[in-house]
């Protein structure tokens, strides 16, 4: 039996919440599953990802294939990194050291992105918006100039 780690959609209309499940490949998206290993809520800010790390590692270890989205979720939580390090044959202490370093890097990246967003918002707030009235008056002046030109062409000057 081929097993996939995938999302099962739940929640109300336009308010999705997903369960991360281990399911048979042949079962439908929202159908029967073997085990629920986590929860993913894309509507919160920041996104909520809750995963049972031990069970996710178990299913990856026995050959379950994650879908693209679940693979991204697993990598954001560091579970794929942990699986890769353990498959290299590193000890648990070495794995924990490398994962803690990785988490520090992720936090630094996140704080940098937040700072950039705040700076961007501040610069947008400082920029004055162009006035629309000047555009309207210039358009009416253009219309008036166009009518003057057509008037002069209709009556040629005789002399």
Image (cartoon, grey):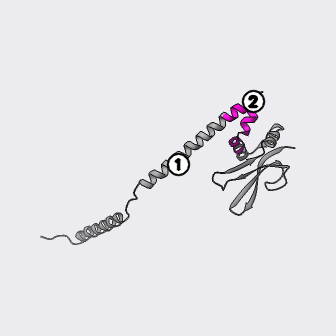
| Left or right: 115 in relation to 34 | left
Quadrant of the rendered structure where residue 79 is? Answer: top right
* N-term mark: 2 or 1: 2
Callouts 2 and 1 close, C-beta under 8 Å:
no
Q: Which of 121 and 140 is in front in this view?
A: 121
- Name the element at disc 2: helix
How many other residues sit within 10 Å of disc 1, few (<14), some (14-19) or many (≥20)?
few
Quadrant of the rendered structure where residue 103 is? Answer: top right
Q: Is residue 148 above or below residue 105?
A: below
| Residue identifier under label 2 | 93
| Left or right: 109 in relation to 3 | left
Q: Is residue 152 above or below residue 128?
A: below
The number of numbered badges drawn on the structure is 2
For the record, the magenta segment spans 72-100
Q: Is residue 90 magenta?
A: yes
Q: Does the magenta stretch include residue 51?
A: no
Which residue in the rendered view is the most extreme toward the left? 159
Q: Where is residue 51 drawn, in percent x and y?
A: 75, 46
| Residue identifier under label 1 | 117
Q: In this view, does 90 lie above or below 114?
A: above
- Name the element at disc 1: helix
Quadrant for the C terminus in the image: bottom left
Numbered disc in front, either 2 or 1: 2
Q: Where is residue 70 drawn, in percent x and y?
A: 73, 46
* Residue at image coords 63%, 51%: 46
Q: Where is residue 36 drawn, in percent x and y?
A: 81, 50
- Our reading of the magenta stretch's main secondary structure is helix
């Amino acid at each position: 039996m081929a097993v996939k780690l995938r999302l099962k959609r739940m929640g109300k209309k336009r308010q999705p919440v997903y369960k991360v499940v281990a399911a048979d490949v042949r079962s439908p998206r929202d159908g029967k599953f073997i085990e629920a290993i986590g929860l993913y809520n894309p509507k919160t800010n920041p996104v909520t990802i809750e995963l049972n790390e031990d069970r996710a590692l178990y299913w990856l270890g026995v050959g379950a294939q994650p879908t693209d989205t679940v693979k991204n979720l697993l990598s954001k939580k560091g579970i794929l990194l942990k699986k890769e390090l353990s498959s290299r044959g590193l000890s648990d202490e070495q794995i924990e050291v490398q994962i803690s370093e990785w988490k520090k890097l992720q936090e630094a990246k996140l704080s940098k992105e937040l700072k950039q967003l705040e700076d961007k918002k501040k610069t947008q707030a400082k920029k004055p918006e162009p006035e629309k009235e000047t555009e309207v008056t210039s358009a009416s002046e253009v219309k008036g100039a166009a009518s003057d030109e057509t008037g002069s062409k209709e009556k040629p000057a005789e002399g």
